[in-house]
Amino acid sequence: MLPGCTLEGDELFNEGDEMIPHITDMTLEQFSDWLAPIVNCGIFASRENLIALLAEDAPHEELEEEFREFFNGYYVLAVDLEEYEEAVLGIIEGNEAFVHLKHRVSTVEAQRKSSPLGREARRMGLSVHGDLVPEIKVAELSSNDFRKLMHALGNWQIFVSRERLVKLMETEHSVEMKARLCAEFYEFFVCYLELELFLENYDYDPDEGLELRPEFIEKLEREEEYIRSGGKMYTLEEVAEELGIELKCMN
């Protein structure tokens, strides 16, 4: 078995009110169950739609709409993976078996210009003071340049790695499969970091230009009534001030 790929044991750690196995202590069954929603995240279905739209030379508006779904899927994937970054990178760093991944991680870390909080804010169309402000506004790209971006994203290595993960998860369980599944997940994770780095240069707000849904307006009205009746709501700015963070809109 490859170093850093032991998935046996029952030791758990607290995450909020839930007890979740540490990634290196999961059994094979636990690891596969944990991976299932990740490899079935919306970004992967959206990528297939993007590829199909590009192949049929679909109108720009259809590509824009699908890219919004793609980006939202990327956001969900990032939320699922980012809390495990320290643990995964520690395993890669500590094992010579993953020296090829270690080099790629070093390249990502050397080129990153944003903080973890900055990357999280960017996914929501915001930025953290002092962090990189993306140079390229997706909304201002020409139709040709936008298609080139879609082609680049659609052919990202993470999608190839995801297919290998899925096949391994469907393979009969064995000691060898444990090692291969674990090693492929580390490859997948590094591909995700490289995708995150690439998108760091792009200014994009998936909610820009969207109309408010009736149910969301109704929720806002309920919250407004709550405030009028004496309730207290906190703005994003107030939360940022409490945490000592300076936010600014990128659009």
Image (cartoon, rainbow, N blue to C red):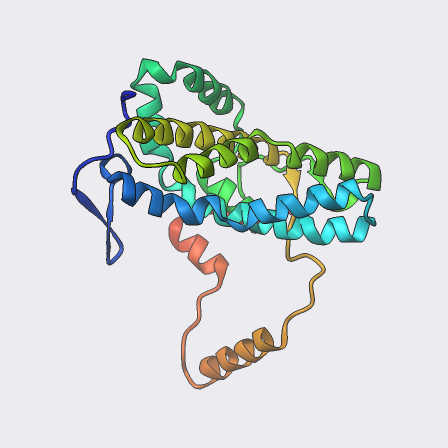
| Residue 180 percent coordinates (x, y) | 36, 27
Q: Residue furthest bottom?
A: 229
| Residue 135 percent coordinates (x, y) | 68, 35
Q: Is residue 44 above or below residue 184?
A: below
| Residue 32 percent coordinates (x, y) | 35, 43
Q: In the shown orientation, is residue 208 left or right of residue 113?
A: right
The answer to which quarter of the image holds residue 159 is top right
Nearer-the-camera pick, 73 or 39: 39
| Residue 21 percent coordinates (x, y) | 24, 44
Quadrant assignment for the N terminus: top left
Q: Residue at x 41, y 34 (%)?
A: 168
Q: Is residue 220 above or below residue 159?
A: below
Q: Residue at x 64, y 51 (%)?
A: 205
Q: Is residue 251 visible?
A: no
Q: Is residue 228 visible?
A: yes
Nearer-the-camera pick, 170 or 197: 170
Q: In the shown orientation, is residue 35 left or right of residue 6?
A: right
Q: In the shown orientation, is residue 224 left or right of residue 2?
A: right
Nearer-the-camera pick, 238 or 218: 218
The answer to which quarter of the image holds residue 5 is top left
Q: How many marks?
A: 0
Nearer-the-camera pick, 159 or 248: 159
Q: Residue at x 65, y 52 (%)?
A: 68
Q: In the shown orientation, is residue 20 left or right of residue 48?
A: left
Q: Residue furthest front?
A: 172
Q: Residue at x 19, y 45 (%)?
A: 12
The answer to which quarter of the image holds residue 50 is top right
